[in-house]
């Protein structure tokens, strides 16, 4: 299954099938790249798949180096990017080298950022191994590292040569990570495709059971929806902002919890619920759509409320450096109905503070 991301000279294919890891060497040979390949992976993925990828690349004649980071959001840092850049320099990687991301969203964002700045940009390939990365973060060219004051605040738009999605990688995914990716799947239904949202409602059991055919359909549809948006607005000047539904508050939660309390999808799930609740309160959206969203999130094992002992101010502080602030006010993505969202500017801090004060649990 192939989904094309149409960006003119920067266009690339998303290939979805089983057995791709064994084909990475020959597939990379089809591109005009040099012989040097740096694989960036993490200490969970490396024991599972790094050897397979290294063998494929080496058999195809590539000179390879594997850099393994600690799994988790804390590794997506300026300091870690510097360490990987030092490895590239010390091993004398040239300008025609390729950085290959083998892992989830953290690995993809970090490796892509490194590729975007090393010698002003080298070849980059995404091999996402988590559901979240396969349906969302590996597609579209957003690469970044976190800062203590905000998530994804240092980054670039940098498109890969290709995205290769091997469905077999999902078989080793921890269940919490599986649910984590489903938040981004649900997001696509809310923002762009009511029929897809209904499909998810109807196939919850098959999704939870990781039915191969259903999962392939879900991944392909998410990639199609994101590719269509990215093709129209690569640099997020307008339409692409809709992909951030649930992310403004979600990133605030992640930051308030010091990037350790919530997985990204868990925070986004709560962010989607709060944004939808705000939309209901302000007359944008019906309460019946809010109920459908909550029911589907819960059905797919995702949180819908804030339960950690976080303060409202810590969440707001995490949101304060959000990239969606214009003239000191937030731009929120609010649903009109399932399948349609609006980009709403001019929402002030007081309104969001009031929303959070009613949602954050009181702690002694």
Image (cartoon, rainbow, N blue to C red):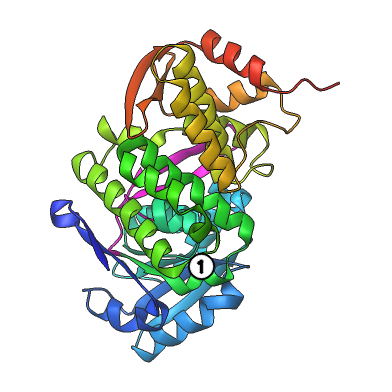
Count the marks: how many? 1
Image height of 47 relative to 239, above or below: below
Q: Work out whether residue 22 can be spotted.
A: yes
Nearest to the observer: residue 353 or residue 184: 184
- Element on which disc 1 rests: helix
> Where does the N terminus fall, quadrant-wise?
bottom left
Residue 321 x, y percent position in the rendering: 50, 26
Neighbor class of circle 1 (other Cα within 10 Å; few <14, some 14-19, many 20+) is many
Work out which residue is located at the far front of the displayed protein and give it.
202
Image height of 276 relative to 304, above or below: above
Nearest to the observer: residue 98 or residue 181: 181
Image height of 75 relative to 188, above or below: below
- Magenta range: 138-162
* Residue in the image at 40% along x and 80% along y: 19
Q: Is residue 216 left or right of residue 103?
A: left
Residue 205 x, y percent position in the rendering: 53, 57
Work out which residue is located at the far left of the displayed protein and give it.
8
Q: Is residue 153 magenta?
A: yes
Identify the residue under disc 1: 170
* Residue in the image at 65% along x and 15% along y: 358
* Residue in the image at 76% along x and 29% along y: 309
Nearest to the observer: residue 275 or residue 20: 275
Residue 89 x, y percent position in the rendering: 45, 66
Nearest to the observer: residue 261 or residue 196: 196
The answer to which quarter of the image holds residue 257 is top right
Q: Is residue 35 magenta?
A: no
The answer to which quarter of the image holds residue 267 is top right
Residue 241 x, y percent position in the rendering: 33, 32
> Where does the C terminus fall, quadrant-wise?
top right
* Residue in the image at 57% along x and 69% along y: 45
Q: Work out whether residue 76 can be spotted.
A: no
């Amino acid at each position: 299954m192939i989904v094309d991301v149409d960006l003119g000279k920067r266009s690339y294919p998303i290939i979805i099938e089983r057995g791709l890891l064994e084909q990475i060497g020959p597939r990379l040979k089809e591109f005009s790249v040099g012989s040097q390949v740096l694989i960036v992976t993490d200490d969970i993925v490396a024991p599972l798949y790094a050897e397979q990828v290294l063998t494929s690349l080496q058999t195809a004649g590539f000179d390879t180096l594997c850099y393994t980071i600690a799994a988790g959001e804390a590794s997506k840092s300026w300091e870690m990017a510097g360490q990987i850049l030092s490895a590239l320099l010390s091993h004398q990687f040239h300008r025609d080298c390729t950085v290959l991301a083998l892992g989830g969203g953290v690995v993809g964002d970090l490796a892509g950022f490194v590729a975007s700045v090393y010698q002003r940009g080298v070849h980059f390939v995404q091999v996402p191994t988590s559901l979240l990365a396969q349906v969302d973060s590996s597609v579209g060219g957003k690469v970044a590292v976190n800062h203590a004051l905000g998530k994804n605040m240092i980054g670039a738009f940098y498109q890969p040569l290709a995205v290769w999605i091997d469905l077999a990688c999902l078989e080793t995914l921890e269940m919490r990570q599986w649910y984590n990716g489903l938040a981004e799947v649900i997001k696509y239904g809310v923002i762009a495709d009511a029929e897809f949202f209904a499909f998810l409602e109807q196939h919850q059991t098959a999704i939870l059971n990781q039915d191969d055919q259903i999962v392939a359909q879900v991944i392909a549809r998410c990639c199609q929806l994101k590719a269509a948006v990215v093709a129209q607005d690569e640099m997020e000047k307008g339409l692409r902002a809709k992909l951030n539904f649930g992310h403004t508050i979600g990133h605030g939660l992640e930051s308030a919890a010091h990037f350790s309390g919530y997985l990204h999808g868990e925070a986004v799930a709560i962010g989607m619920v709060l944004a939808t609740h705000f939309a209901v309160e302000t007359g944008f959206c019906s309460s019946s759509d809010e109920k459908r969203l909550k029911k589907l999130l819960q059905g797919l094992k995702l949180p819908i409320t804030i339960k950690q002992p976080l303060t409202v101010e810590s969440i707001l502080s995490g949101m304060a450096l959000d990239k969606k602030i214009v003239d000191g006010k937030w731009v929120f993505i609010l649903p009109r109905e399932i399948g349609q969202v609006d980009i709403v500017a001019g929402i002030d801090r007081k309104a969001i503070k009031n929303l959070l004060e009613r949602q954050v649990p009181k702690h002694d």
